[in-house]
Image (cartoon, helix red, strand yellow):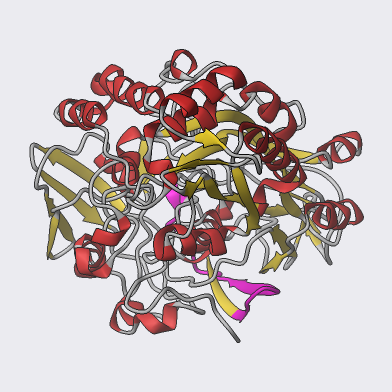
Amino acid sequence: MNLLTAPPGRAVRPVALLLALTLTSTALAACSGGGDDTASDGGYATAGTFTLALATDPGNLDPHASATSSVIGMSRLAYDTIVAVDPESTEVVPSLATEWSVDGSTATFTLRDDVTCADGSGFTAETAAANIEHVADPANESPYLGAFLPAGVTASADGDTLTLELAGPAPFLLEGLAGLAMVCDSGLADRDTLAAGTAGTGPFVLDEAAPDDHYTYSVRDDYAWGPDGAATTEPGTPATVNVRIIANETTSANLLLSGEVNAVQVIGPDTERIEAAGLYSTESAGLLGEQWYNHAEGHVTADPAVRAALAQALDLAELRQVLTSGKGSPPTTLATVSPAACTGDSITGALPEHDPVAAAATLDDAGWTLGDDGVRAKDGKPLTIAFLHDTALGAGGASAAELATAAWTDLGVDVEATGKNTTELSEILFGTGAWDVAWEPINVSNPDQLVGFLSGPAVADGGNNFAAIDNADYTAAVGEATTMQGAEGCDTWLTGETALVEATDVTPFANSLVKIYGNGAEFLSTGSIVPTSIRVLS
């Protein structure tokens, strides 16, 4: 089996946290509906199989080495977190820890004493501390450092108590820990086994990994320590979860309608016939259209005038319409996943107006002159951009990318447009750096989770700042906001986001209510399915 691997000496560090950062909830209380398997109990199948279709193969399954939506979603099947966030109440609820306190720079957690790993070993506070120390070590290059776990944190254990010492303010510490998977001792001792296997305390365990085809999990019958007490003894809990990798959204939609697939996220035009069939669905808000520019030296997009012109040339409202099949809305913040920590509008007034004439003038003034071949150049260097877009955005994403390419071509830009799946695109963003413009949405709940992607060390220097953004106003706002606790700093966080958009450091252009549809099963979702909520119907 060939697994996607990182460039030599680097961990796979994907960026697409697509609607999958807060996969925690209580168990689904009641479901009803149509068929799947053998015997039943009150409308639910006994020993049923739940089949989920994903558009992108996850690659390396190590839950600390990759942050794509597929890895995060699949990790929730096999791993738990220290605490969880209930998506309805937005309250932090127990998971591996039963109680906790945060006092200044010290946070303590009391861990349950009845948790076992899939191999039968116990999960202890010492194991939890080892997880924190691994992610916190910059040498391990985990994308979760700075996004889910504050930089500089140290961990220790004493009996059933886990203690974290913080290096600085962490306004959303608990919310971040709610997204950080905990690996059992066997996986910590040999991380190579995590690439195509699992070593967790979660409700399911991986039995078979066939990359680019399927991943099969079996239920743990003794699991009873999920978020807020969720257990696998609930009627309708599947005995088997089968994750199928199906790149084509129309194919997935067909399999869903035929009942061969129980759940799939659909964002393109196929939603119309699925809606017409009256199938079950869950929905969550998320940022779907987000345009990034490579600020690194040697790229034409390091020129602020080029970035501004590329944004001015686009009809963002039209792109949104095409990308979301007319069902999207203008984005208002950069951290949108429910339960979002900060609400407001940091984006609308900061976006450039669609004005191709002004875009051309911007380039003219910056010395990018139009040649006889229709391509602009400056100092003998042609205005050529490598434009990458995620194929997980579906048919709408491909069509919107064609519109953007046409607009930039009319402006005098030589566009090399390429569709990549999330894993491939992530390896470029965090590996080769061979890109100028990219469409890849980052979706988080808390604005502090974006800081490492929007500022600080670039990828070349070991950081997560894949676009090499350096915005002094944003950095200053972050410095101020992190001294405030939770929502107290929201206005300042939003001020920082506005500075990024105004400088055309990033251009968000489409929000969407992303739906996961179900046939023969029901479930809860905060962008990705909550494993303990799955109920197979009979």
Near-viewer residue (536 or 212): 212
- Where is 407 relative to 190, above or below? above
| Residue at 50% across, 43% down | 25
- Horizontal relation, residue 413 to residue 517: left or right: left
Give residue 184's position: percent from left, percent from top: 34, 73
Give residue 280's position: percent from left, percent from top: 78, 40
- Horizontal relation, residue 317 to residue 225: left or right: right
- Where is 186 relative to 19, above or below? below
Image mark count: 0
Residue bounds of the magenta highlight: 208-229
Q: Quadrant of the C terminus?
A: bottom right
Whether residue 336 appears in magenta in the rendering, the answer is no
Near-viewer residue (411 or 164): 411
| Residue at 35% across, 69% down | 183
- Whether residue 335 is visible here, answered yes or no, is no
Q: Residue furthest front?
A: 372
| Residue at 66% across, 55% down | 419
- Quarter-of-image position of residue 29: top right
Give residue 485's position: percent from left, percent from top: 20, 27
- Whether residue 463 is visible here, answered yes or no, is yes
